[in-house]
Image: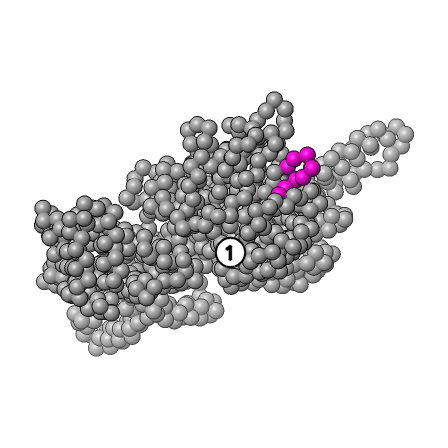
Amino acid sequence: MGQVMKLKKVLLRWYKSFHLNYREQFDRGENESFRPWNELTPSYAGDSKFPFIEIPIEPDVTTVVGANESGKSHLLNAINKVIKGSGVDGISPFSKTDLCHYAGIRRINVEAWPNIGLLFSVDDPMELLDVCKAAANEGLATAGSSKCFALILAPDEQHEAVLYVAPSTTPVLLDKDKLEAVRSKLPEVQYIDSKALLPSEVTLAALIQGYDSNFNSYGLKQRKSVETTAALISGLTAPTAQTLPAFTTELSKAQSGMMELRDPPPTKDSLEMLLFDQILGVSGETLKYLYSLDGADRGYVEGQIAKWNEGLHDVLNLSHFWHQDEQFKLTVNYKDGVVYFEIHDKTECIYTFNERSSGLKYFLSYYIQAKAMDMSGRSKKSIILMDEPDAALSILAQRNLLAVFESLVRPESSSLTCQLVYTTHSPYLINRNFPRRITVVKKEDAEEGTQYIERARARRYEPVRTALGIDNAPSLFLGSDNILLEGSTDQYVLTELIRAFATPENVGEFLDLNSLVIVSADGVNNVTNILEQSRWADEPIPPTAVLLDSDEAAEKEIVRITRPDKPSQRLLERNRICLVGDSVSPFGNNQSIVTMEDIVPIKLYKAAIRKYIERWHPTILGDHGNHIDTTLSSPEFGKTGLVESTKDLFKKIQPELAGDFDKMGIFQEVVTDVYEHMTRGAPSEEISSLRTNVRSICRSLTDALTIARETNARYSATRSIKRLIKDFCRLNKARVPITNVQKLIKRLEREIEPIGADGDELAALMRAYVSKLEELRIAGQVRLVDNEWAEWETKIESIQKNPLHAANIDAKSAVLKNSKQNAAKLGKAEPQPDSQASAET
């Protein structure tokens, strides 16, 4: 992940709910040779060994999942205490009171301390040298080819902490000064406060005091309070001896009133300060200058505010992350010495913060904090912590927040120097593309306390469901788009291979597992039934793409789905159905691509069959070993497809099953092999071929989903337009204000924006109508009446009939109008539009 120091593990013993590592289990493939901290035994603990609980941290994002009281927040505090000396609140220091209640080292006296530590990986020798110099032990950096070091807080009478630099297991004892020196070389810890909120307004005087505490002024938010206080002061007269007590009382009352109404200055890490200082880059001197101006300079002030809003729009780019509204933006306004924070959305209305949901306000809070950290911490080592951000957010807002998290760790944002660790109770804040990021902690029933669930189990998601308290196992996640597959093995292998191959750099080449649902039909003959059940009343089937095998059964099912003889009953168009054989071309020895098994290189699949039999049927291997080896080594194996060849093999070695075999079991061996290769970072030629095939399938499904989304978007836009016009015509019968028509046209423009090029025809017509209406208003006309309204009513109703094909409405209306006028002059019957023209309009 680049030449920079990264947190690799959190080490915990006797700390809060983290007691000891009773299981002593570690993630598969992990090098267990360097664990000198487990030899660290305080004098009051005797000669017993007390293994630390080791919580792995990913180099980019770590999602800590667990039930209430499982120790997630303690984990974040431990990271902060090792690096900063106190918890994330900045107040709670590391102390003996952090000792676990179950700790066996607790004695009559209070000498026992909890132990917490961090293991860092470091590729840059100079960074390691800096750490060793800070510990006054420079020789450790040159003693060997070290790639990691551990800092453990284990206080005793003389020392505060211990430093281990691999490969040496000799502890370097650190006193208080050396500990602070080592801490200064570690990554900076930043905390996104999940309870902070941006205020609705802040006085300019208070904002200036956030920059300069010596700035002397009263920030009063309400004009009424200013005028009341001014009237009270102006009513005071010079006191005489008799009136002095009353004068003093009135003066004290005025001072108290001003102090109560005064806007307190924001702290340096408050959201309003982050917004102005870190994100916008507004200087304190600029604010002081604006404060010095009076009403005569309002034009200058308004111009400056407009410049700030341009900057906010460009830097925040909120619509990119808040997917509920593409026109959503945050702006500032300034009136009577008060800076107001306002929200604009697609309704073109301006809202105060008090008028919006708490979920929106909290999302803005998290985003502003994250953006400030992004802009201030680029190319600087940092660890960002956040505790349970899901409480106030809807499912969609949580997914929006996932995108914000990804923006913090992307290469162009942080140069791969940033790590994010956050805790959650929500399945929707788990990035399904990267299961390696999930860290599950579970509090056991007795003195074991909180324990770490190893990654091999967490990757199956079952411990995640248990930790979150979710009962429905198969459908943990929901999405707006859908992929429908023939069977559960197809579902398993596609999702697992995407997770194995996807990285933050190439994730766009695969399906985004966070934004869609992958569903198994449990058999090709059930695909049609699933599609029929997903359609409600007259609503269309949600955006769905189907992947089928390239066999005769699939072709029959395609006919049932597309119903070429009954288009009105068609479930899906053919271009939304993909076949495995069309998506993946023959490659290497795999010359017959029929099923999902055939996308796996034959060599890799053969090895998986062998491992499966060894694991689950050792007796069969003993009885039929020679036949198995001969069959798997034959060049004929897989020529007609891997499924058929595997069936033939199992007919011989398990004749009682008539060729049926455990497809899932073999696929599990394939997936395990892939994960092991990808973990080592050196994929074989077969693994690379498989990755290419998975990409090809994802590309085919993505293209089909794009078509499905466009189809549904056109349907949704058409229905919305028809509904809006129907409501408009019901409320506007005669003498219609031009402004009402303009509002309708603008609303129709917004409705067609999401469908892109499909709405270009109508968009062009809307622009022409806007120009015509504006010309009427400039000419002084206020309403559309009589024949003129009848003409506009015809135009609007014509759009309602066929919204996306309305380009020739004006031309047809003009022809019809001229025909009517000519007929009236000649005294003839008015011509009627022909059936073709009627159909088009």
Residue assigned mark 1: 408
Q: Is 263 left or right of 567, judged from the image as shown?
A: right
In the depicted structure, whether residue 174 falls above or below residue 723: above
Residue 134 drawn at (x, y percent):
67, 51
Q: Is residue 356 visible?
A: no
Residue drawn 11% across the image and 53% down it: 652
Say which of 767 and 610 sits in front.
Answer: 610
Colour mapping:
one colour
Q: Is 343 left or right of 86, judged from the image as shown?
A: left
Residue 665 drawn at (x, y percent):
24, 49
Say which of 610 and 595 sits in front.
Answer: 610
In the depicted structure, whether residue 179 falls above or below residue 547: above
Find residue 799 and report its image quarter: bottom left
Q: Is 790 left or right of 52, judged from the image as shown?
A: left
Residue 119 on the magenta span: no
Q: Amino acid at mark 1?
A: Leu
Outermost residue toward the top in this view:
108
Residue drawn 25% across the image and 62% down it: 603
In the rendered structure, which segment of residues is drawn in magenta? Answer: 155-162
Say which of 654 and 592 sits in front.
Answer: 654
